Image (cartoon, grey):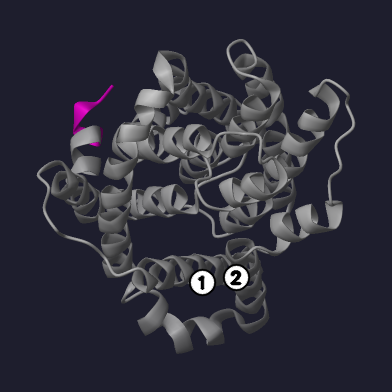
Amino acid sequence: MDVSLVVSNILNPPVLFFFLGMTAVFVKSDLEIPAPVPKLFSLYLLFAIGFKGGVELIKSGITQDVVLTLAAAMLMACFVPIYSFFILRLKLDTYDAAAIAATYGSISAVTFITASAFLSELGINYDGYMVAALALMESPAIIVGLILVNIFTVDGKREVSWKEVLQEAFLNSSVFLLVGSLVIGVLTGEHGWHVLEPFTQGLFYGVLTFFLLDMGLIAAKRIKDLQKTGFFLISFAILIPILNACIGLLISKTIGMSQGDALLFAVLCASASYIAVPAAMRMTVPEANPSLYVSTALAVTFPFNIIVGIPLYLYGINLLWR
């Protein structure tokens, strides 16, 4: 792999601030971000990326490429949790396996945003409609995870409030804001973009940097939980993203995605949810251990993807597209 890609990614200010946050925890600094601020930054990032995606989507229109990409996104969102579940069942019970599988079947919006920033830094173009793929991939894994629990529990009959499940899957704050911003971007187009550009573009990298500083603090604190996961889960949290990314790259090559779109699609396939899915699993599968599915996604897969994964997947793209 081209080491310069890894170095270029690590020397990005947002990634360096992620390291700074982790370092603060390791050296026992009292650095902390007040609780409401990260939530605000998270909402801002979702709004900005969703709005930009909507503007770009209306520019490109609903083409065959768009339809194929969104269909591939839905396919992976449903497929990843199924085979992940059977791998996890080798060592874990049904509840933990389903919860972790759902976590890895969904996506991390911040990993996607970091990858898009990496592409911008390298001057590689990507299409805004990839944000629509991001929105579509967030929720299906929750449904698939619950179906797996219902099928493979001993009695096969669990009382599940599907109304609450669907509400959590499709109307949680991150999905609602992302889709809503996308729709507003479509409706307002270029005019809306020019009106909001100083806010959606000028502040974007600063907010992303500050948010990753907070993510570094949280990830470092979660590392202690890894003692409970064991070697099997830590290996899973590194190897399954690579497998998912490889499948994503093969699909991207087959349907003719550009290199920038292929990287974002691979990142979507490789990332794991540490917000939406854990919240849904806590509510619907209380038997599962949250320290397993949260710590693997947040303390292993998230840092792996933003430090090593993104340049690794781009290296794979350079080989396949050469």
Which residue shows up at 53% across the image and 44% down it? 273
The picture quadrant where one finds residue 177 is bottom right
On residue 47, which mark appears? 1
Q: Position of residue 39 (x, y in %)?
A: 43, 68
Residue 17 visible in the shown view: yes
Which of these two is toward me, 48 or 296?
Answer: 296
Toward which corner of the image does residue 234 lie, by quadrant?
top left
Image quarter where the C terminus lies is top left
Q: Which residue is mark 2?
A: 177
131 lies left or right of 12: right
Determine which quarter of the picture holds residue 27. Answer: top left
Q: Which comes sooner in the sequence, label 1 or label 2?
A: 1
Name the side, left or right, on which 146 lies relative to 45: right
Q: Give the farthest residue toward the top.
A: 90
Which numbered circle lies on residue 210?
none
Dot 2 alpha-carbon crowd within 10 angstroms: few under 14, some 14 to 19, many 20 or more:
many
Lateral position of residue 169 relative to residue 129, left or right: right
Give the CA distance from mark 1 to mark 2.
Answer: 6 Å
Amino acid of disc 2: Leu
| Residue contact between numbered discs 1 and 2, judged by CB atoms under 8 Å | yes
Q: Main secondary structure of the magenta part?
A: helix
Quadrant holding the N terminus: top left
Q: Secondary structure at mark 1?
A: helix
Q: Give the percent coordinates (x, y) of residue 20.
A: 16, 50
Residue 124 covered by magenta stretch: no
- Image location (x, y in percent) of residue 25: 18, 47
Marker count (numbered): 2
What amino acid is labelled 1 in the image? Phe
Is 155 on the left-hand or right-hand side of 262? Answer: right
Q: Is residue 240 above or below residue 302?
A: above
